[in-house]
Image: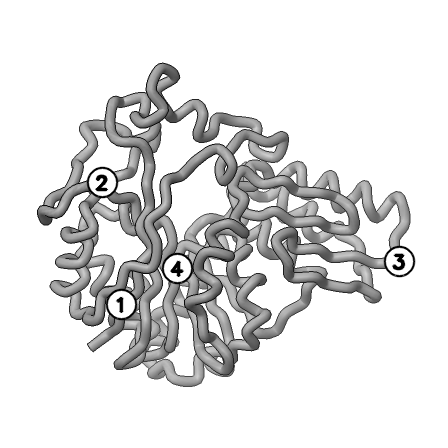
Amino acid sequence: MAEFYPTLTIIFIMDLEKIIEERKSWLGWKNIAPLREAIEKLPDIEDVEVELGDWIRVSSSDMTKEDLRTIEDAAKMMKPWRKGPFDLFGIRIDSEWKSFMKYDLLRPYLDLEGKSVADVGCNNGYYMFRMLEFSPASILGVDPSPLFFTQFELINRYIRSDRLRYEMLGIEHMPGFADMFDTLFCLGVLYHRSDPIAALKSLKRSLKRGGELILDSFVIDGDESVCLVPESTYSKISNVHFVPTVTALENWCKKAGFERFEVLEIVKTDSTEQRKTEWIDGESLEDFLDPKNPELTVEGYPAPKRVYIRAYRK
C-alpha cells in the first residue's frame, strides 16, 4: 500500500489499512459472494487490445465461445451497471448513464499528465479508465460499494492498468490521504451528504496546496445563497439532502477552504444521457419525472440540472 501512496504518513497508512482490511469482509455478503466466485472463474486472456473511447473496448483474437459465455454471465450477474458503457470482447454493457457525455464535457478542462489523481464516488471506475489517456502518475478510486468494486475488477482484469487502485472507502476517509492529490474528482456525490461543508473539508484535506477539485452537483436556479431541502425524496432518490443554487455551492466551497471557484458547465439531465437499458433492470430518468411536465420531478421539484465546477485548495 505504501508504494502506491508514497506521501502518506505511517499513522494514516495504518489507520486506512485497518479500515480497508475490515471492509474486505463486505465481499462476503450473500448478494456479493456469488459475484466474487464469478470473478474467480473468469478466463485469463493474454492477447488483448484496449480502446479508451466513449465505449471502453477490450478485444482479443484469442477467445473461445466458452470464454465469452463465462464473461457475459459474470457481467449480467453484476447488474445494475450504472456507469459506462463497456464493450468486453463484443459483449456490449450498455449502462444506464452514457458516462462519456459527462467525460467529454469535462475533458477540455483536464490536465492530468504525471499527476496524482483521485475519483471520489468512482462507481465502477469508468472515468478512471478514461483518464488513463492523460498518463497520470496514479489514480485512486474511492467508493464504498462492493458491487461497483467487483464491476471494476471485472473490467480491470483485462485492461490491467497498474496506475489504478480502488478502495471501498468514502469521503469521510479522505483526510487519511492528507496533502496527496493534485486533482480530485467528486462527481454526483455531494448532494448525498447530510453535511456538505464537512464533506468538502474532507476533500480539501486530501489535496495538495493549490490542488484542484472538479465537482458536479444538482443545482436549482436562483442568484441567492439558498438550497432546496427535499421532504423525503428527490427524483425518487431518498438520500438527496440539499440541492443548492450555484451561489450557495460557491459559499460552501469558500467555507470549506477553497478559492478561485469556477463554473465550467451547467447542464440539464435528459434521456439521451440517462435512460433504461437491459443492463439495469429497473427505473431510470423517465420514471423520476412528472409524466405531465418533464420540467418537474415526480415530487414536484425542479427537474435535475447539474453544475460542473472547479475550485482550488488555498
**Up-down: is 155 above or below 233?**
below
How far apart are the two marked residues, 1 and 3, measured between alpha carbons?
Answer: 45 Å
**Up-down: is 25 above or below 261?**
above
Residue with the mark numbered 4 = 120
Report whether residue 22 is seen. no
Q: Quick check: 215 left or right of 89?
A: left
Residue with the mark numbered 2 = 220
Give the number of the mark in front: 1 or 4.
1
Question: Are circles 2 and 3 on residues that touch, CB within 8 Å?
Answer: no
How far apart are the two marked residues, 4 and 2, measured between alpha carbons?
Answer: 23 Å
* First along the sequence among labels 2 and 3: 3
Other-residue count near label 3 (Cα within 10 Å), few / some / many at <14 / 14–19 / ≥20 = few
Other-residue count near label 1 (Cα within 10 Å), few / some / many at <14 / 14–19 / ≥20 = many
Please give the label number shown on residue 311.
Answer: 1
Mark 4 secondary-structure assignment: strand
Give the number of the mark in front: 2 or 3.
2
* First along the sequence among labels 1 and 3: 3
How far apart are the two marked residues, 1 and 4, measured between alpha carbons?
Answer: 15 Å
